[in-house]
C-alpha cells in the first residue's frame, strides 16, 4: 500500500491569509491525487482532482499543485467558510488511501 | 441531479449482523466504481473498499479485508456494506462515494451512523 504523510495536522490562520497544506507519498503516484474538504457534521466534498484540476463549483481561491510524491493544496485568501478538515487521497492504485487530515481554524 | 442516498442510522449489539445500503439516483450505476469510507468518532477518513457494479469486481483495503463484505445489486442500483458479526469498534459513520470519470470520489452519500453497544 502507498503511505501518505499529510501536514500540518492543525493549522490556524487569519482571514485573508494564504495557507498551504502538504501531502507526501511513499512512492510516486503521477498526478492521481485528490483533495477533499469536510465541514463539521457533513460528508466530504471533492475540491481538486488530478492534483491540480478544480472541481466544478469550487472557488478559485483553492488550488493544487505537485506530481510524483509531493503535493500541495493552497487557499489564496482564507475565508471564514473555509473552516474545515482537509484530506488528500491517492487513487493511483488500490487501496486508495487518505491522508491523516488537516484541521483548519481561523485565528 | 446525481445523488447517493444511504440507509438510516443503526443501533446494534455486538455479535449482530448488519447490511447498510447506498442507492444511486440519476446516473449509470454500472459504469462507475462505488467506494466505502469509514470515519470513527473524531477521526479521519479510512478507505475501506470499492466495487464496480458492472462486473462486481471488488477490492478491499487490507485493514478491512475479511471484516466486511461489499456487494451491489445492479437491478436496483444499490451498493451494500455488511458485517456478519459486529464489534463495538465498528461504531462509526460510514460513507459511500462514487469514483467518477476522474476516479476521485466526486459524489458522496450523506453517511450512515452505526452504533454498536451492549
Image: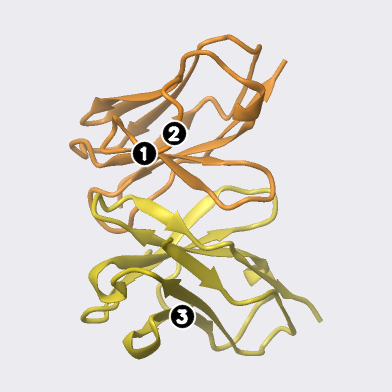
Chain colours: A orange, B yellow
Tag 2, which secondary structure? Answer: loop
In the drawing, does residue B108 fall left or right of residue B43? left
Q: Residue placed at 49% from the left, 55% from the top? A: B46
In the drawing, does residue B77 fall left or right of residue A103? left
Q: Residue A24: x, y in percent?
A: 35, 30
Check the image and report above or below for B51 versus B95: below
Q: Quadrant of residue B88?
A: bottom right
Q: Residue B47: x, y in percent?
A: 43, 58
Q: In this rendering, which labeled residue sits more in front, label 2 or label 3?
A: 2
Residue position for label 2: A58
Q: Residue B27: x, y in percent?
A: 33, 68
Tag 3, which secondary structure? Answer: strand
Tag 1, which secondary structure? Answer: loop
| Dots 2, 1 in contact, CB < 8 A | yes
In the drawing, does residue B80 fall left or right of residue B93? left
* Label 3, residues with CA under 10 Å away: few <14, some 14-19, many ≥20: many
Q: Which mark is residue B80?
A: 3
Q: Quadrant of residue B58?
A: bottom left
Amino acid at each position: 500500500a502507498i503511505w501518505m504523510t499529510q501536514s500540518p495536522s492543525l493549522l490556524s490562520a487569519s482571514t485573508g491569509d494564504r495557507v498551504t497544506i502538504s501531502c507526501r507519498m511513499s512512492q510516486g503516484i503521477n498526478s492521481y491525487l485528490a483533495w477533499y474538504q469536510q465541514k463539521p457534521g457533513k460528508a466530504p466534498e471533492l475540491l481538486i482532482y488530478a492534483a491540480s484540476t478544480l472541481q466544478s463549483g469550487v472557488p478559485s481561491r483553492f488550488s493544487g499543485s505537485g506530481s510524483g510524491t509531493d503535493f500541495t493544496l493552497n487557499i489564496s485568501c482564507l475565508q471564514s467558510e473555509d473552516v474545515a478538515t482537509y484530506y488528500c487521497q491517492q487513487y493511483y492504485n488500490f487501496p486508495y488511501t487518505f491522508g491523516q487530515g488537516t484541521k483548519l481554524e481561523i485565528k | 441531479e446525481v445523488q447517493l442516498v444511504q440507509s438510516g442510522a443503526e443501533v446494534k449489539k455486538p455479535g449482530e449482523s448488519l447490511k447498510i445500503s447506498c442507492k444511486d439516483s440519476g446516473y449509470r450505476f454500472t459504469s462507475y466504481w462505488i467506494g466505502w469510507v469509514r470515519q470513527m468518532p473524531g477521526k479521519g477518513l479510512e478507505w475501506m473498499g470499492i466495487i464496480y457494479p458492472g462486473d462486481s469486481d471488488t477490492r478491499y483495503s487490507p485493514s478491512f479485508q475479511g471484516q466486511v463484505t461489499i456487494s451491489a445489486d445492479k437491478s436496483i442500483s444499490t451498493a451494500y456494506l455488511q458485517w456478519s458479526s459486529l464489534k463495538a469498534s465498528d461504531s462509526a459513520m460510514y460513507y459511500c462515494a462514487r469514483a467518477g470519470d476522474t476516479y476521485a470520489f466526486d459524489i458522496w452519500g450523506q453517511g450512515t451512523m452505526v452504533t454498536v453497544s451492549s
